[in-house]
Image (cartoon, helix red, strand yellow):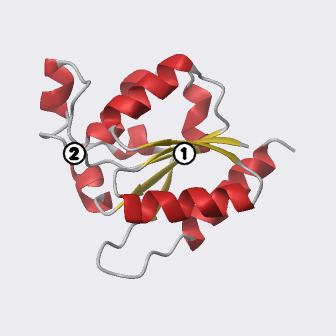
Amino acid sequence: MKILVYQTRGSVAFPLEEILKERGHQVVLCHSLEQAIEAWDKDKSFDCIIAETNDSPQGLTKKERELSQTGLLSGWIWLKNYVFRIKPEMRVRTIMYTDYIKEIYKFVPYKKLRDIHFAKKYIHHEVNFELVLYYVEIIENLEQ
């Protein structure tokens, strides 16, 4: 599968990219929201998106920056306004890999989050990709 990985933390992004490539996936790695916006604008043929939520809201409009709660939800705003608006079918092909799951549910109605996979990212623990890789397998099976 062709996977867009939007992850600002290199200690998470690089091992995840390596594991996905070892499993035969083509990976486009974005280290910022601006890179994710640019990658999506250039190519909308991704089979899967793995995205974080908390990042600098650079690249968003003034209104979108306000909605992002000063960056806390910038990844969600990008997905909602740039990805899902153009390709709503990407909802079931998206994994939110974040340590801010509670905050997302606090600010975003559950109905808008339906069909999106969530995997908790633990900052202060050894990085564990099991749930992300499990969701990647589920998404891969959607194609069969």
Q: Residue at x 23, y 55 (%)?
A: 103
Residue 2 visible, this angle:
yes
Dot 2 or dot 1, earlier in sequence: 2
**Residue 61: x percent and y percent?**
20, 18
Q: Residue at x 48, y 18 (%)?
A: 41
Q: Is residue 73 above or below residue 12?
A: above
Q: Residue furthest bottom?
A: 125
Q: Residue at x 34, y 57 (%)?
A: 9
Q: Which residue is mark 1?
A: 115
Q: Which residue is mark 2?
A: 107
Q: Is residue 87 above or below residue 10?
A: above
Q: Quadrant of residue 22?
A: bottom right
**Residue 91: x percent and y percent?**
55, 37
The residue carrying pointer 2 sits among few (fewer than 14), some (14 to 19) or many (20 or more) residues within 10 Å by Cα, namely: few
At mark 2, the secondary structure is helix
The residue carrying pointer 1 sits among few (fewer than 14), some (14 to 19) or many (20 or more) residues within 10 Å by Cα, namely: some
> In the shown orientation, is residue 57 left or right of residue 75?
left
**Residue 88: x percent and y percent?**
55, 26
Q: Are marks 2 and 1 in contact (CB under 8 Å)?
A: no
